[in-house]
């Protein structure tokens, strides 16, 4: 894997990350890009793994540039918008794109961070990183790396976003060079692409080596071979996806976690995944307790027919099991109600 920091004088690599509400923002952005746009754009939009994205057609209609679903090995052509396919990471190499089904990051594939890190590693100060509407904080780490590598950071003004949580969360950790409405971004990006950039990357050799390893992990799923457990501080936490050991990585004020197989989380995405795991286990407990109550009731009825005095004990046990299942059932619903009142209430930035 080679780096291409000095092969061009302009910022011509534009990487864009968005989640819920991002389609509207992307349409507004590309509408402002001119026909003679000299850069290339690369887009990660979080969509369900089973859904085929319609984004290429949507963005073609919204603007004048060609928008395509990225294919593994595609050469990078100026004036083209490359869109990550569902359930695959979009990774940049020098002069081409890599589309691969690597390990999930922040519970997503494609991952904004995976795209952003690869762009920062290969293209350094040539990169313009853009964050649009969404939830949680996928993209914060990658955007921080772009900034450290001398790239430019553009964040959608949260007041302009359909869902402001992602822009807000990213702003907690990365200082935006430009805070912009989506409708103004096309002209802004076009102006930045036409200017000469300056090399001012600040990552140390050790940080660059870690960055390189993380890009390789996203591409090839070689987490264990890349010695992830030596890249950060061991924690008592385990990966919700594969139950492997998690190591803590720190970037400025950002706390991240990776397991030895390669899954990656920010603190907020790890908390979200753990909450879902807890909820799933609680529902399993409700089911088992209800089955236990039914079986105890059946035994009690059988003993009643035999006129055995132990029937009363089994009736009591059946009622206790049912009451315990109802308590857990009601607890889960209360927690869901709390999160639905404010979707950010149990999220922590980073």
Image (spheres, helix red, strand yellow):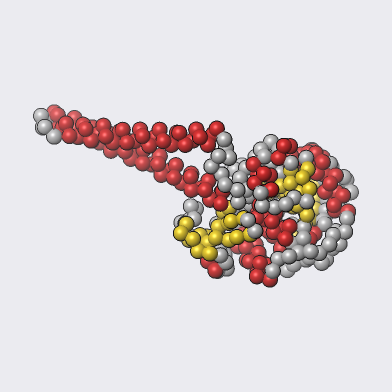
Residue sitting at 80 percent across and 46 percent down?
Answer: 66
Q: In this view, does 207 lie to the left or right of 331?
A: right
In the image: residue 310, left or right of residue 322: left
Residue 103 visible in the shown view: no
The quadrant in which residue 297 appears is top left
Position in image of residue 247 (x %, y %) = 53, 61
Residue 309 position, x and y percent, is: 11, 32
Q: What residue is shown at x 60% (from left), y 51% (from top)?
A: 350
- How many discs mark residues in the rendered view? 0
The quarter of the image holding the N terminus is bottom right
Q: Which residue occupies the foreground of this view, 268 or 77?
A: 268
Residue 152 shows in this picture? yes
Q: Where is residue 347 in the image (x, y as percent from the top left)?
A: 56, 44
Rendered position, 37 above or below 61: below
Pick whichever, 349 or 43, lies toward us.
Answer: 349
**For residue 271, side relative to residue 3 (left or right):** left
Q: Position of residue 21 (x, y in %)?
A: 68, 38
Q: Residue furthest bottom?
A: 205
Up-down: is 136 above or below 328? below
**Residue beneath the point at 60% across and 48% down:** 349
Residue 121, picture quadrant: bottom right
Please determine whether, in this image, residue 315 is positioned above or below residue 105.
above
Q: Which residue is drawn at 82% across and 56% down?
A: 12
């Amino acid at each position: 894997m080679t780096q291409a920091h000095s092969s061009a004088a302009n910022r011509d690599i534009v990487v864009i990350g968005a989640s819920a509400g991002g389609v509207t923002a992307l349409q507004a952005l590309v509408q402002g890009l001119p026909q003679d746009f000299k850069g290339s754009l690369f887009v990660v939009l979080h969509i369900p793994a089973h859904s085929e994205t319609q984004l290429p057609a949507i963005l073609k209609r919204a603007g004048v540039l060609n928008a395509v679903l990225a294919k593994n090995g595609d050469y990078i052509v100026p004036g083209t918008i490359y869109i990550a396919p569902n359930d695959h990471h979009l990774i940049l190499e020098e002069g081409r794109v890599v589309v691969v089904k690597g390990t999930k990051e922040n519970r997503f594939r494609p991952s904004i961070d995976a795209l952003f890190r690869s762009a920062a590693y290969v293209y350094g100060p040539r990169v313009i990183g853009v964050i649009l509407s969404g939830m949680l904080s996928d993209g914060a780490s990658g955007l921080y790396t772009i900034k450290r590598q001398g790239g430019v950071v553009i964040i959608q003004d949260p007041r302009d976003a359909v869902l402001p949580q992602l822009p807000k969360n990213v702003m907690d950790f990365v200082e935006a060079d430009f805070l912009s409405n989506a409708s103004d971004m096309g002209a802004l990006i076009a102006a930045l692409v036409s200017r000469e950039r300056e090399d001012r990357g600040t990552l140390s050799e050790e940080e660059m080596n870690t960055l390189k390893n993380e890009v390789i992990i996203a591409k090839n799923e070689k987490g264990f071979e890349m010695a992830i457990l030596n890249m950060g501080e061991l924690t008592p936490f385990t990966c919700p996806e594969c139950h492997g050991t998690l190591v803590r990585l720190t970037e400025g004020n950002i706390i991240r976690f990776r397991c030895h197989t390669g899954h990656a989380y920010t603190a907020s995405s790890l908390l979200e995944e753990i909450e879902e795991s807890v909820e799933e286990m609680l529902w399993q407990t409700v089911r088992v307790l209800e089955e236990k109550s039914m079986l105890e009731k059946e035994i009690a009825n059988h003993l009643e027919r035999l006129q055995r005095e132990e029937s009363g004990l089994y009736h009591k046990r059946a009622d206790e099991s049912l009451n315990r299942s109802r308590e857990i059932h009601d607890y889960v619903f209360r927690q869901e109600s709390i999160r639905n009142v404010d979707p950010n209430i149990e999220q922590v930035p980073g």
